[in-house]
Image: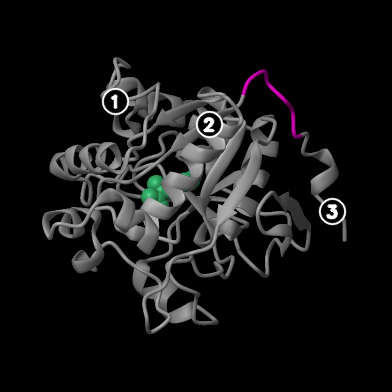
Amino acid sequence: MSKVSPSFSLVSRGGYRGRLAPSPTGLLHIGHARTFWRAAQRALENHGTLILRNEDLDPQRSRAEFARAMIEDLRWLGIRWSEGPDCGGKYGAYSQSERRAHYREAWRRLREGGFLYPCLCSRKYLAQSASAPNDGDDEPVYPGTCRERKDVTEFMEPAGVNWRFRVPEGEEVEFADLNLGRQRYVAGSDFGDFLVWRRDDVPAYQLAVVVDDEAMRITEVVRGADLLKSTARQLLLMRALGYAAPDYFHCELVRDSAGTRLAKRQDALSIRHLRESGMTAEKVLEMAGWP
Ligand code: GLU
């Protein structure tokens, strides 16, 4: 088995640049408070720049009112950023819904490089063929049904079919997380050929994040540990696109008293709800595990 890690150069590209990348699909909760506070601290400690990016790619789930709320809630917590919405930066340049042309260009390059294939499997078929229950919101391992399709050239546009990244079967993807230590995933078994563009013409999270982290010259990604496996996928995408990988710092997840991971729909633990019930920002951060 070959290891992926040596070919990922962790390049220092000048000063530290970190990002907050919330999706406006619900109210931020104390789990977000923990991660975003940590991201802000890392940027401060490193005398760096912090960027706010609005991850509003999914038109079905993103709402302008949640985007407004996340900005207000972050400010209320005392988190400051110096690029992106609401700090003089051009909103559109930092909103994924406005950046589709960049993702499309990456899709084109990946397709031409032979990294992608169109997948015509129905949702029903995929649900039936999922071999193992997937953990949390993770993408199930794709059974590979469309992998050897010979008709890629018939699909000139990303819309209309699902596009998957062909992962190098059996390859180990290793990275040293700055918080959680060494991580190792095996492509093809820990995760399969993942989506980069959806049939309904929405670029997938994995592709958009990689393109944006490169374009915004992010040097360190701070995010929740639920995305560790996605980091492995993204390292493969970055290599295919010829990008240098940033450093990673994954934060432990906040769990409720029953040990369940917090989700946006648990409104009682939303920053907004806690604030309206009279709690101070200090208290919310304390609940989130700070200082
Ligand atoms: N927008 C993603 C989320 O809210 C986070 C993306 C990332 O940090 O890479 O879960």
Q: Is residue 227 visible?
A: yes
Residue on which the image places disc 3: 3
Label 1 neighbour load within 10 Å: few <14, some 14-19, many 20+: many
Q: Earlier in the sequence, mark 3 or mark 2?
A: 3
Label 3 neighbour load within 10 Å: few <14, some 14-19, many 20+: few
Element carrying mark 2: helix
In the image, taking residue 31 as reference, residue 234 lies left or right, namely: right
Spatial CA distance of label 3 from label 2 is 34 Å
Q: Which mark is residue 44?
A: 2
Residue 178 is situated, as x and y percent measured from the top left of the image, at 69, 49
Task: Respond yes or no on whether mark 1 lies under 8 Å from ligand 1.
Answer: no
Amino acid of disc 1: Pro
Decide whether residue 11 is among the magenta residues: yes
Instruction: Please provide the residue range marked out in magenta.
Output: 10-15
In the image, taking residue 256 as reference, residue 279 lies left or right, namely: left
As displayed, is residue 189 above or below residue 27? below
Amino acid of disc 2: Leu
Q: Nearer the viewer, mark 3 or mark 1?
A: 1
Element carrying mark 1: loop
Residue on which the image places disc 1: 85
In the image, taking residue 241 as reference, residue 40 lies left or right, namely: left
Residue 72 falls in which quadrant of the image?
Answer: top left
How many marks are shown on the rendered structure?
3
Spatial CA distance of label 1 from label 2 is 19 Å
Q: Residue at x 30, y 20 (%)?
A: 87
Residue 34 is situated, as x and y percent measured from the top left of the image, at 42, 54
Element carrying mark 3: loop
